[in-house]
Amino acid sequence: MKALVWHGKRDVRCDEVPDPAIQEPTDAIIRVTSSGICGSDLHLYEVMGPFMNEGDILGHEPMGIVEEVGDGVGNLAVGDRVVIPFQIACGDCWMCDQSLFTQCETTQVRDQGYGAQLFGYTKLYGDGENSIPGGQAEFLRVPQAQFGPIKVPEGPPDDRFVFLSDVLPTAWQAVEYADVPEGGSVTVLGLGPIGDMAARVAHHNGSRVIGVDLVPERLARVAARGIEVIDLNDHEDDLGDTIREMTDGRGTDAVIDAVGMEAHGSATAKFAQQATGLLPDAAAEKLMKTAGVDSLSAVYLAIDIVRRGGTISLSGVYGGMADPMPMMTLFDKQIQLRMGQANVRRWTPAIMPLLTDDDPLGVDEFASHRVSLDEAPGAYEKFQKKEDGFVKVLVSP
């Protein structure tokens, strides 16, 4: 089959690789019909290379048609249309019983000290040695298929449902964790796919939303939905003051950081990330596990912007282990922090009604670009450089 394969920093190729096969009774094989390129895939493209192996298959936002099921999968049949959550969870352990599917005790990567396995996302979330083959491919092996796949109805195009794999539940959890009071306000930092969708969800819930970014196309997408936006290029030095002026001098009730480790504006973090990229993989792994290599400018902005007693919800991916945090300010402002990978199946029941009736969140037109597997390496480059309006890319094998 064809698949998108990691060969090194900024080197993604469409290769011929062996077809997947059933390995466990709880496996299923799906024929992928659509798969997203996620903002966190860019971390693999750029920063997280030390935890990748050449030949790893990328992608964690797939949907498709069931082609084969193992003997232990009783809830799926060949021909079912399914969306595959980005995390691999059993649905039956103590953590899954708490709806903490990203902490599944059956698939936890204990030898790396990390949570549940993820599709196509480094050996830290793989089997400890290799990543789990991902869904930017023609076919995908789905472990724990007795629980993970989400059945969706026939009829609407893939765009209606594919974002259940990651974007929708991640944005939904970001808003839930932000705990915006009824009629309250939230600032969304970063209007890439997750920030854009989080702004839509919060706006749909009746909150006042202020979206912040520096890419014109992203600002325009969110503004077109009637949401207030601020161009960071115009307010890089006074963003907190500007938002306080808009909110009776307090700041917003909550802030969602949808940016993560590659935030704009930190020369020190950029140097640390570039230096890490020059080290041999073993040394780079050790450095990233023990040092601060993230750009925390978005976090610092969030701490400045949020009102006293407010909440910061982190949905952007961070990778450093010793990043400096302004603990005095966090304590003094009595700020609550919530974060973590989205527990996809926890939020599916609340999201699904918004996908099977009208389209209040605008998922049908959410993708900015659609490409084939052969075209996808170029899409990675344009998405990473924020060129040509690339905001959300769907790959059609």
Image: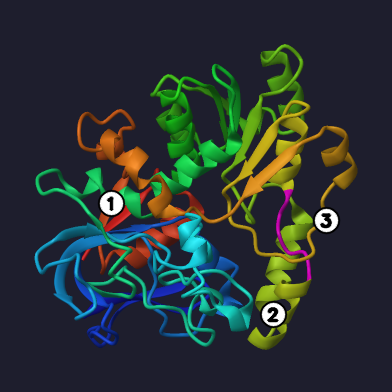
Name the residue beneath numbered marker 1.
Answer: 162
Give the amino acid at mark 3. Answer: Pro
Q: Secondary structure at mark 1?
A: helix
Identified at 51% across, 55% down, the residue is 98
Pick whichever, 380 or 108, lies toward us. Answer: 108
Q: Residues within 10 Å of mark 3 (few under 14, many from 20)?
A: few
Give the amino acid at mark 2. Answer: Ala
Name the residue beneath numbered marker 3.
Answer: 324
Q: Is residue 296 left or right of residue 392?
A: right
Give the amino acid at mark 1. Answer: Val
Q: Is residue 292 magenta?
A: yes
Measured as percent of width and height from the top left, residue 148 is found at 33, 63
Which mark is in front, 2 or 3?
Answer: 3
Residue 391 visible at all: no
How far apart in space, not on screen, are marks 2 and 3 (Cα)? 19 Å
Identified at 39% across, 69% down, the residue is 90
Q: Residues within 10 Å of mark 2 (few under 14, many from 20)?
A: many
Q: Residues within 10 Å of mark 1 (few under 14, many from 20)?
A: many
Residue 180 higher or lower than 16, as above or below: above
For residue 284, the mark is: 2
Query: Magenta stretch?
Result: 291-296
Identified at 76% across, 15% down, the residue is 249
Residue 393 higher or lower than 142, as above or below: above
Measured as percent of width and height from the top left, residue 358 is found at 22, 29
For residue 67, the mark is: none
Q: Are marks 1 and 3 in contact (CB under 8 Å)?
A: no
Measured as percent of width and height from the top left, residue 227 is found at 47, 22
Between disc 1 and disc 2, whose residue precedes? 1
Which mark is in front, 1 or 2?
Answer: 1
